[in-house]
Amino acid sequence: MSRLIADVVIVGAGIVGCSVAYHLAQQRKARVLIVEKSAIAGGMTKRSGALIRTQLAHPVEARLAIASVKFFRQWKEHTGANCGYTPTGLAIVAGEEHAARLREQTARVQALGANVQTLAPDELRSLQPTARVNDVALASYEPDAAFVDPLLATQTLAARVKELGGVFKTGTFVKRIRVEYGRVTGIETSVGVIETLNVVLCAGVWTERLLQPLKIELGLQTRRAQLAFFERSADLKVGHLAFEDWITGAHFRPHSFGLTMGALNATDEDANPDSFDESVSSAFINDVQQRVATRLPAMAHARFVRGHSGVYDISPTGHAIVGRVPSIGGLFVATGLHNIGLTIAPALGACLAELVLDGEARTVDVSALGVA
């Protein structure tokens, strides 16, 4: 059995783990080792809907998203490669019942510096003439919203980490976190012990099981979510806005190669991340297509092309859990990211790196998301 030593060990080589590694390695102050049980972006990152937007309900998450958008737009400057960044614009639409909540949310993130504005139904129709808006009381519009290729983004970030001296141990299973006298001393893995005084858990849906032996319960739920891709009709070949539809309960965005990706706002049943149905059901395909077509009637007869499922980690509050684990020195966590992990990954990685190296996050104050 081998024995390795690192200043910081990151568990999980998805987009968040690679972002933490990038910001640590860029400082050139730490020997960084990333442990991943499968491949880089081999977990839930590659199944992400990958919509980049700033209009998030929690103010700290919104600040993280605002800071992350800048990073995504400058991706090549940071990594030397592209991440598939494709602007689309985003419209969030609400009926009378939720119009006031949407107005308040939009004003809140606008005050934080996000480029968002509210629109009346006829203004939305001017932006998206093919949209049905007769049931819309209010819309919020974010012109800078975009999507990226989650696999490409993670792999190019990981490549830059390697150039900066970070080391990846893929195909390596973490058995347990070693703690002595209230302090992290390393991790035990399938290839041996790795000694370290700092462990950052970016393991997504697998986080809870790594914390349970330490008697730390975060109450995370793991929920399956399905995504479907449809071929757009000739009327929509040039694309369309991304939509988060509070009326129909669906969200959708244009995708590459003339496709549209659609999903439901509510996640499915509880799921085991090691054994879940990765396909999409015919009932889901029909349901999401009807909901998308309610907003964009031209999608009513769009051909289903493909689909897949993933599993989200969801905290009891529905918001991210980020920061130190109070009872154990040198243990940090980023979890409960639901469907925003990729959206906030660049700034979240910077914050965790700052917490490890400097003891406080400066990019965004994430203390309100701390481990209780």
Image (cartoon, grey):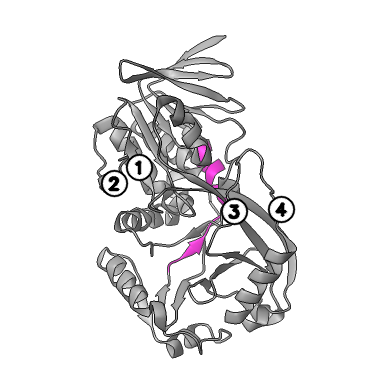
- SS of the residue under disc 3: loop
Residue on which disc 3 sits: 269
Quadrant containing the N terminus is top right
Residue type marked 1: Val
At x 53% / y 62%, what residue is drawn?
266
- SS of the residue under disc 2: loop
Q: Alpha carbon of mark 3 to alpha carbon of mark 1: how far?
A: 25 Å
Residue on which disc 2 sits: 366
Sooner in the amino-acid sequence: mark 2 or mark 1: 1
Instruction: Provide the residue span drawn in magenta.
Output: 144-158
The location of residue 265, given as percent across then percent down, is 53, 64
Residue on which disc 1 sits: 322
For mark 3, does the 10 Å Cα neighbourhood hold few (<14), some (14 to 19), or many (20 or more) residues?
few
| Main secondary structure found in the magenta portion | helix
Looking at the image, can residue 269 be seen? yes
At x 66% / y 45%, what residue is drawn?
276
